[in-house]
Image (spheres, rainbow, N blue to C red):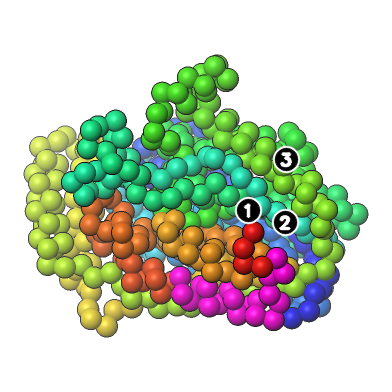
Amino acid sequence: MEEQKLLIGWGHRDITPELPVMLRGQFNLRLAREVLDPITVTALAIESQDKSSQLVMVSLDIVSVSNFIRDEARREISGKIDGLNPDNVFFNATHTHTSAVTQMAEGRPEITWPDVEGYDREKTSRFIIARMVEAVQEAWAGRKLGAISFGLGAAVIGSNRRICYSDGTSKMYGDTSVREFTHIEGDCDSNVNLLFTYDPSHELTGMIVNVPVPSQVTEGIDKISADFWHETRCEIKKRYGDNIHILPQCSAAGDQAPHPLINPAARRRMLELKYQTDIPMAWRKEIANRIANAIDETFPVASKDIRDKAILKHENIKLRLPPWKLTEEHLKLAKKEMCVSQEKLDQLEENLLDEDYSSTYARVRYYKNIIERFERQSDSDEFPTEINITRLADIVFATNQFELLLDFGQRIKARSMALQTFLVQLTGTGTYLAPQRSCGSGYGASPMDGEIGPEGGNALVEQTVEQVNAMFSENLNPFGARF
């Protein structure tokens, strides 16, 4: 692989749909009749000057990029954009819980409720897909000679949300103030991986900001919002210019959240004193400042090593992972819990906009889906998925479709031969993927919550590491494996 001059282009669109909008991300249905801040899509196109390698990265303010959304967007790209292989385009979600309900597959809803008040999720999906394609078109058409730099910053914006107790159980968002609390289950990651792009005169044009935290500070509100990424984009633009493009990426973060669970009172007090506003919005502003401060510290250093030429190589790789099998015990539990939820539902007045009714309705569907999945599974089942591996200079981007718990992400980063490894999760229909130590209790750590388990996660790690390191076998990390 040889270094080439790079052609770089950016695209951006607003994807805020017409109101009212059904919101996805909680068990209860929420209908947004108001926009707190816009949700957007941003695309970055990079191509080697000799046209031998190409890539477009696309980020959206939604919960996850369903396979339906991804495949339909690629289909339209294939028919509308000459010279761009749609398999060289990957899409990631910021995982905001205040974005629109969309389609998962033809004729299959992405979550369990029917459309309400005339809301048409397919229409909204088509609108978002059209804007995605427009952003890709803009980025691809705007390719010009440019340059890159990269660097690693740090910002404490998230923490592990799986809480462990003396009886051996774990719970997501568990109470840490009780006597039975023993420890936080896993690590947290404060790394901020940054890629900067420049025009030929080395003026900054945009940046990728990769953090291991989903955008879920105000996850339960009933308004359209990009969550903390709205404040973060505003703060970065205030410091670096309104014309700067910002592409957010969520790294492995299935057990991470922007909700510190140890001594939260002290954090609340400091936020009140600092921002003089309600705590959730103050925390969004604080996260924005922490990310922007990490950029401020990293950008001048990274700009000492601007690359006008770089190796670029991208591969879209289809994998088949071993599925996580449901057992007879899971089936028995699902049937029992479905009956309990159905009995409760039958006693409630039918109203999907009522929190109690909609959450109970969702639980009925949740357990029914588990029963249907048990009946479909067989010994020969395989779970099809894709990963995208992109080498750019000394760094690599590696995608997966899951809410990947941090253990798996740390293993990939630790064994990667790249100088920096940008993990990008939720690039397809997302389900939790938990390591062995998390399994046994707590939401997100059971085959009832995800179709891939520890065995599939191990296979994903091994194949990702293998593909990443194959791209660097001829060009070893000059800085060595240790600091």
Mark 1 lies on residue? 193
Inspect the image, locate mark 2, and give the three-letter code of the amino acid beneath it.
Phe
Q: Are marks 1 and 2 in contact (CB under 8 Å)?
A: yes
Whether residue 191 sits left or right of residue 68 in the image: it is right
Inspect the image, locate mark 1, and give the three-letter code of the amino acid beneath it.
Asn
Residue 253: percent from left, percent from top: 46, 52
Relative vertical location of residue 262 with respect to residue 446 in this rendering, above or below: above
Mark 3 lies on residue? 296
Q: CA distance from mark 1 to mark 3?
A: 13 Å
Mark 2 lies on residue? 150
Residue at 81% from the left image edge and 73% from the top image edge: 4
The part of the image, by quadrant, that contains residue 354 is top left
Q: Secondary structure at mark 1?
A: strand
Counting residues from the N terminus, which is met first, the one under dot 3 or under dot 2? Answer: 2
Q: Secondary structure at mark 3?
A: helix
> Which range is magenta?
461-479
